[in-house]
Image (tube, helix red, strand yellow):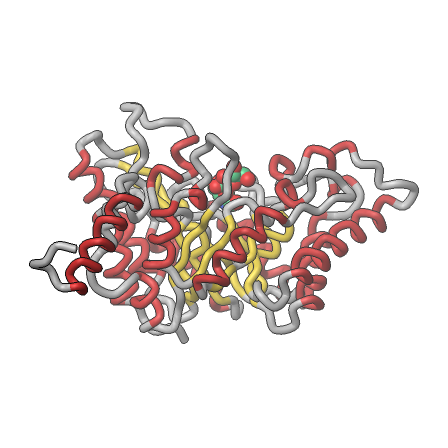
Amino acid sequence: MNPHLTRRQVLTRALAVSAAASLPALATAPGPSLNDLAQAKGRRFGSTVGTGKPGTLTGSFADVAYRDLLVAECGLLVPENELKWGALRPSADVYNFEAAERLLAFAKEKGLAFRGHTLLWHHPRWLPAWLDKHDFGAKPAQAVEKMIADHIAMVAGSYKDRITSWDVVNEAVDADTGGLRDTPFTRHVPAERILDLSFHKAREVLPQGQLIYNDYMSWEPGHEKHRDGVLRLLEGFRKRGTPVDALGVQSHIMVVEGGPKYDEAAWRRFLDEVVGMGYGLLITEFDVNDKGLPTDIALRDKGVADYSRAYLDLMLSYKQMGDVLVWGMVDKFSWLQGLTPRADKQPFRCCPYGSDFQPHPLRDAIAGALKGAVAKG
Ligand code: 9MR
């Protein structure tokens, strides 16, 4: 031991060295966490996390710094893919909960809540391939209904003490037409009936649960039919007594150069109608596609932050707005990086933190909006 140092100084230095050696620099923004700010107004802030496939961008859970960032900023997590049919059910008879269990164990250890996504992604592209050729037998309508009810009983039932808020149905409305999508299930049972029975089954399993219809209709132009279709669906749920508590507004927003290109009045009308029917709201998958902004990083980050602030201020002016979740905390793990690239081939700067784990101006914009929000009613 260096005779000029006290025991405490030696220990402090040793800890600092070991932290520096093992951890990438995590520059969590100073002051209250995003979840602290959300909680002050009666809501929670959270993010998605994914176990991914080795070698893909989505494996954020493998990254120690990412996990630390989740703990530093979030109050709840949602699995990116691990509770979807495609991940849970490699075949009709097999359930594989291993990846979901890993995420749940982490959340439990760190005292973080956990949302469920999703009991039925009502979209032909995102249901498992085996379903397309599945033989539903002599009474296919009954077999389809049983398969969906059994799935919900198994998945929601397995986690009924740990997951109390579920995206029961995801993206059932066709964004281009506003009608309901067809899937291998709708060959035998009308879509409306499938959605109703999914919510009824979820309610049976979770009498006190928060049951969500989740979709990506947004405030940019081009979303008119999608918004109308979602409103019609929500109206139908109310008329038929389908137990749906809230609309999950995914919030994959897109910023373009040359000023705001969103229809604030139409968006407010949409949200007013939703809450007017008695539904709550959540932001379930916020991120920002910055494809339309220039290469210059400072300009781009400011554009993303300003656009997001305008969006989040509007959303958080509703007392019905509940939890706010982002679809990833750090750029490099975002699903957007795998999408059609920007013209300049630069990575998207779409999340609150950059790939170097430094906060973007977007992080301040989220913090400001959470701070300025009306309290959850
Ligand atoms: O981010 C998810 C990506 O890793 C998956 O490949 C994809 C298909 O399962 O789903 C992405 O998440 C989507 C979410 O489940 C529903 N809303 C849109 C999200 C982004 O595409």
At x 70%, y 48%, the residue is 191
**Side of 96 where 283 appears, left or right:** left
Image vertical order of residue 21 relative to residue 271, above or below = above
The residue nearer to you, when weighing 301 against 195, is 301
Image vertical order of residue 159 relative to residue 296, above or below = below
Residue 373: x and y in percent read 30, 67
Residue 34: x and y in percent read 31, 61
Residue 39: x and y in percent read 35, 70
Give residue 237's quadrant in the image: bottom right
Quadrant containing the N terminus is bottom left
The residue nearer to you, when weighing 90 against 26, is 26
At x 59%, y 61%, the residue is 235
For this orientation, the residue located farthest to the right is 138
At x 45%, y 55%, the residue is 284
Residue 307: x and y in percent read 26, 48
| Residue 354 showing in the rendered view | yes
At x 67%, y 56%, the residue is 155
**Side of 298 where 318 appears, left or right:** right
Give the total number of marks visible in the rendering.
Answer: 0
The residue nearer to you, when weighing 214 against 104, is 104
**Side of 160 where 278 appears, left or right:** left
Quadrant containing the C terminus is bottom left
| Residue 172 showing in the rendered view | no
The residue nearer to you, when weighing 35 against 251, is 35
For this orientation, the residue located farthest to the bottom is 377
For this orientation, the residue located farthest to the top is 344
**Side of 153 where 164 appears, left or right:** left
